[in-house]
Image (cartoon, rainbow, N blue to C red):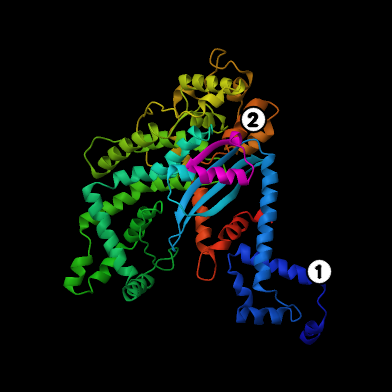
Amino acid sequence: MTMIQFGQRPLNKQRDAKITSLLVNMIVGDMRPVNMVHGTNFTKLMGYIEPNYKIPSRQFFTREIEARYVNCKLKLIDFLKSVENKALTMDTWSSPKMESYIGITCHFWAGRDIKSYVLATCQVIDSHTGENIASWICTSMEVFAIPPSKVVAVVTDNGANVISAIRVLKEKYEWCLHHIRCAAHTLQLCIKDCLSETSIKRAIGAARHLVQHFRHSPKAMDEIRKRYTANREPDTPPTIELSMDCTTRWNSTHDMLKNLCNHQWVIRQYLQTLPISKAATLEMKDEYWQICQKLVKLLEDLKTATTALEGEKYVTISCLIPMVRGLHKIYRPTQDGTFQNKFKEAFISSLKTRFDSNVAHDIYKLATFLDPNYRSRFSTRSEIAQIKVKLEMEDMGHDQAGSCETVTPTPTPVCDEPNAKSSFSDILESGQVSDGSDDSSPNNEDLILGQINWYIQKKIGGNAIPIEWWSGNRTEAEYLFALAKKYLCIPATSAPAERVFSSAGLTIGKLRTRKHVEALNFLHCNQDLL
């Protein structure tokens, strides 16, 4: 068929409708402005590809997106009715236009997967008080017909207004749920505590000043890139990228320092070509370079831990106790007076204060125990006995009274310091305690429930995927399987809600109106509902 014949062939209704549907998918899936369909070059492209296709109006696409939004929302509401237990993550955000939004996501166990859906990306007008935030959460739950009794936990950051909102939900609206404070956010607060030491603050400040010079000077950046390219070794990045850290972007200080230290000599060679007066204001002291290099190594494991905890498609809440105990061992101070030792002392002190006292409670113990990779490996015999009592209370339906409480565990015991770790699995392995290991033979006094007894003695090889393992063994322990579904779907962090705003930021621009932000973001983040 020639191009002339192709252009003259009739366009049937089925193909016409398919093209229109694909255009809607493109707008939603790629976060494109609706008015792009009438862009000059897009019109030319469509005229070449399908000459007989008439592009609908912008208003048509707007109505189509709204219709899909309504249909997908109804589909999700119907789906959620069949889900017994759900976990939520919540966060607030201000757009570049200084408009406030609240983001809420829902997580649950379905089949052999953990499902995650965005419920809301709503613009809010009033102040972010605890009362208002609680009201916004309740409104979203009503829209999606989610009764409070089906919400196992809400994961948020550590903001005072958010903590107040959860308290309002419990006291005023009589919600009975677990409040999980974002583990990644808490870990970053521990890091922030460590970086507040005077010499570290000065070194990081000098690093920021140097990076800022290159980011504000294309000429300077081009110069160091030329020097880098001329001496680049095989299997190294093709170019230099220097990033600036940001207080709201996790691990960004580590990334900034690592990039700077990796290209230290290229940067210092460039500085030598500048006038002495200019170079003096930019060059970092040797002491600061050494501090930055040490910080990169000290922060490496913390970045690994933070990144692993941010996942939403796999089980994360069960990793928190193993991670905290592993970090206790990895960062145990050695009392030798070195810079690294002072950092470790500050980190362990902050870790005990923020995790052991304010975040961890029974739900973490239950989740760790219900993860077949850990079970009793990270619990002492006394802790296993407490878990057994908690499970029995769940069985008798008494958990409703206790789930509103936040239990503060005793500080984690630490042992000899192992070598530095680089993978998340290594960090987790460091936290094992011998008192409650799988090799011990449980007796009837400790494990009176037959399913718990079977579960602890069950041999599990390799790294099990918790959801798949429980799905394959549910007939052996139906009760524990139900509890695993209830608790292992809870994210350890509020990262899912924060990721909602990454796509929302793309939605809000001069080519879009905020009127369609929620519909576009809902469809973009929940594309499997389309």
Can residue 117 be seen by looking at this rendering?
yes
Q: Position of residue 210 (x, y in %)?
A: 28, 64
Q: Which residue is mark 2?
A: 481
Q: The C terminus appears in which quarter of the rendering? A: bottom right
Query: Which is in the foreground here, disc 2 or disc 1?
Result: 1
Q: Which mark is on residue 494? A: none
Give, as a three-letter code, the residue at label 2: Phe
Q: Quadrant of the N terminus?
A: bottom right
Q: Nearer the viewer, residue 394 or 48?
A: 394
Q: Is residue 454 left or right of residue 367?
A: right
Q: In the figure, 472 relative to 113: above or below?
A: above
Q: Is residue 421 visible?
A: no
Residue at image mark 1: 14
Is 153 colored magenta in this rendering?
Answer: yes
Q: State the residue at coordinates (69%, 50%).
A: 74
Q: Amino acid at mark 1?
A: Gln
What span is in magenta? 134-156
Q: Secondary structure at mark 1?
A: helix
Provide residue 336's location: percent of width, then percent of height.
23, 37
Relative placement, left or right, of 132 versus 26 is left
How busy is the neighbourhood of tag 2: few (under 14 within 10 Å), some, or many (20 plus)?
many
The answer to which of marks 2 and 1 sits earlier in the sequence is 1
Drawn side of residue 109 relative to residue 330, left or right: right
Front residue (pair 180, 217): 180
In the depicted view, which residue is nearer to us: 261 or 78? 78
- Residue at position x 32%, y 46% from top? 192
Residue 255 sits in quarter? bottom left
Q: CA distance from mark 2 to mark 1?
A: 47 Å
Whole-percent x, y for residue 88 in the image: 55, 42
